Amino acid sequence: MDLNILVFVLVGFIAQMIDGALGMAYGVSSNTFLLGLGIPPAAASASVHMAEVVTTGISGYSHWKLGNVNWKLVRRLLVPGVIGGLVGAYLLTSIDGNIIKPYIAAYLLIMGGVIIYKAFTMVSHHDLNEYHGPRVSLLGLFGGFCDAIGGGGWGPVVTSTLVAHGKHPRMTIGSVNFTEFFVTLSESILFIFALNFGEYWRIILGLLIGGAIAAPIAARIAQKLPVKTLMIIVGVLIILLSLRTIYLSIY
């Protein structure tokens, strides 16, 4: 825990630049970098979610004001997402970080693959499916669990799956972002009670500062970058970092 705060500022900056360009993957990116720096899984996930409470709150409010929220979809996702997040956060704080680290890295490796897959399968959805059945709630439960365990993944898991199944992209992104605030907040509250945050203030502060610096820059350059190419680069980077973490954990 003697890493300089500037390292965490850099992590927060890079993660926010990625999220600003893709509209997702802040948690997955920052958690992958933190694990690569040797931060324990629970500390990494907790720090990421504490920093995300602010960003998801602003994002969710913005989508609500812009009318991008489908309340039927929110109702299907909110409670299961919170439950999944709490269960994942509880397990993460109850298990030895060194034991679970390679499994989390494996999950992040899969998320890197999901991002690459999404880059090649982005299509316009003309036949939209606006039925939000019980399977959406199960997806929210799974997404919340993965989000807590992996320090991120709510967007890549939930948004990607719903859009791939023909849900309205704009309303899905807005609804999932709105719900994410409550999932992130619930996870953060559990982490506060379970962990000693005196050790992790530099990580949280660094992520917040880096994210705040990157946000306006990312918003400007996102329009100019080829999103497909960037998604592939980010996916490959996450996969390589995750493989490194798995290798170091095993050997």
Image (spheres, helix red, strand yellow):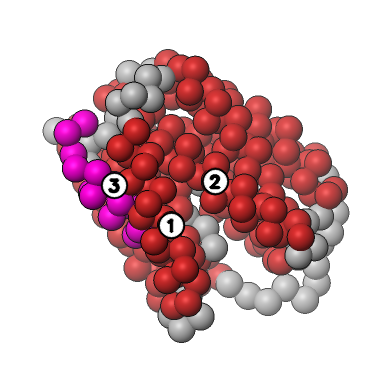
Q: Residue at x 70, y 33 (%)?
A: 80
Secondary structure at badge 3 equals: helix
Q: Is residue 116 left or right of residue 8?
A: right
Q: Residue at x 30, y 37 (%)?
A: 202
Q: Position of residue 60 (x, y in %)?
A: 67, 52
Query: Residue 185: which numbered mark, if any?
Result: none
Q: Residue at x 38, y 39 (%)?
A: 204
User: Which residue, given by chain and number where applicable, does mark 1 sit on?
Assistant: 212
The answer to which image quadrant residue 229 occupies is bottom left
User: Which residue, given by chain and number where applicable, does mark 2 sit on?
Assistant: 54
- Mark 2 or mark 3: which comes first in sequence? 3
From the image, which quarter does the N terminus lie in?
top left
- Location of residue 123 with respect to 197 vertically, above or below: below
Q: Is residue 12 left or right of residue 49?
A: left
Q: How far, Cα to Cα, is label 3 from label 1? A: 13 Å
- Mark 3 or mark 1: which comes first in sequence? 3
Q: Give the amino acid type for the residue marked by disc 1 in the picture.
A: Ala
- What is the span of residues highlighted in magenta in the rendered image? 1-14
Few, some or many residues within 10 Å of mark 2 (<14, 14–19, 20+)? some
Q: Position of residue 172 (x, y in %)?
A: 71, 58
Residue 194 visible in the shown view: yes
Q: How far, Cα to Cα, is label 2 from label 3? A: 17 Å
Q: Position of residue 166 (x, y in %)?
A: 74, 64
Secondary structure at badge 1 equals: helix
Residue 36 visible in the shown view: no
Query: Residue 8: which numbered mark, if any?
Result: 3
